Image (tube, rainbow, N blue to C red):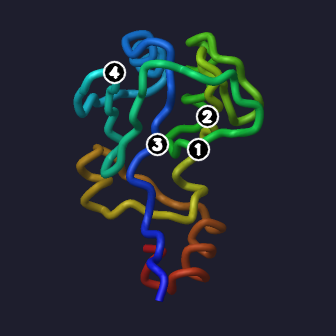
């Protein structure tokens, strides 16, 4: 039997300068710094995290991206624009060429436990479509 994928522990983004990256992303999102080690900074996202790694070694990406789930997609995109990011629909490009897709929590088919949401100070719901996708995939108890 093959092991099952359970989730993503973290994503590492290469940036030019850690302090500049923390400042840039801090203008867009509320950041909680988990810690720093050498040329890396770790930013909490509830029960997950993003690692920022100083030392970009490749050019800007065109299609490669990752998605961040937020409580307010429109506010996040407006903050990204105000921070000087280049917007492309619901994606923005950071100063180092990383593409970030912004997705509203209400629209995704994964859930955070009530305890994790509470620890983040959030009380979020799901759209009917997201609840239907969760129910179809995991059963009726998973969508609540």
For numbered disc 1, what is the local secondary structure? strand
Q: Are marks 1 and 2 in contact (CB under 8 Å)?
A: yes
Left or right: 108 with respect to 53?
right
**Sequence-earlier tag: 1 or 4:** 4
x, y percent for residue 6 = 43, 69
Q: Nearer the viewer, residue 4 or 25?
A: 4
Say whether marks 1 and 4 touch (CB < 8 Å): no
Q: Earlier in the sequence, mark 1 or mark 2?
A: 1
Q: Is residue 21 above or below residue 47?
A: above
* Residue topped by disc 4: 39
- Residue 11 got which mark? 3
Distance Cα–Cα, label 3 vs label 1: 10 Å
Q: Residue 129: horizontal and vertical position, in percent?
A: 66, 67
Position of residue 54 in the picture relative to residue 79 (left or right)? left
- Asked if 95 appears above or below 121 in the picture, the reply is above
Q: Which residue is mark 2?
A: 100
Question: Are the residues at dot 2 and dot 3 in contact (C-beta closer than 8 Å)?
Answer: no
**Number of residues whose C-alpha sits closer than 10 Å to that of mark 3, classed few (under 14), some (14–19) or many (20 or more):** few
């Amino acid at each position: 039997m093959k092991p099952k994928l359970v989730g993503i522990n973290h994503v590492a983004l290469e940036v030019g300068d850690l302090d500049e990256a923390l400042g840039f992303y801090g203008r867009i999102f509320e950041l909680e710094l988990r810690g720093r080690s050498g040329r890396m900074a770790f930013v909490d996202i509830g029960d997950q995290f993003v690692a920022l790694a100083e030392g970009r070694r490749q050019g800007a990406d065109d299609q490669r991206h990752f998605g961040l789930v937020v409580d307010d997609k429109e506010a996040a995109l407006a903050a990204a624009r105000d921070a000087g990011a280049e917007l492309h629909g619901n994606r923005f490009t950071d100063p180092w060429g990383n593409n970030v897709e912004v997705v509203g929590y209400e629209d995704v088919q994964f859930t955070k436990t009530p305890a994790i949401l509470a620890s983040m100070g959030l009380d979020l719901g799901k759209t009917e479509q997201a609840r239907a996708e969760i129910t179809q995939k995991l059963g009726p108890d998973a969508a609540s």
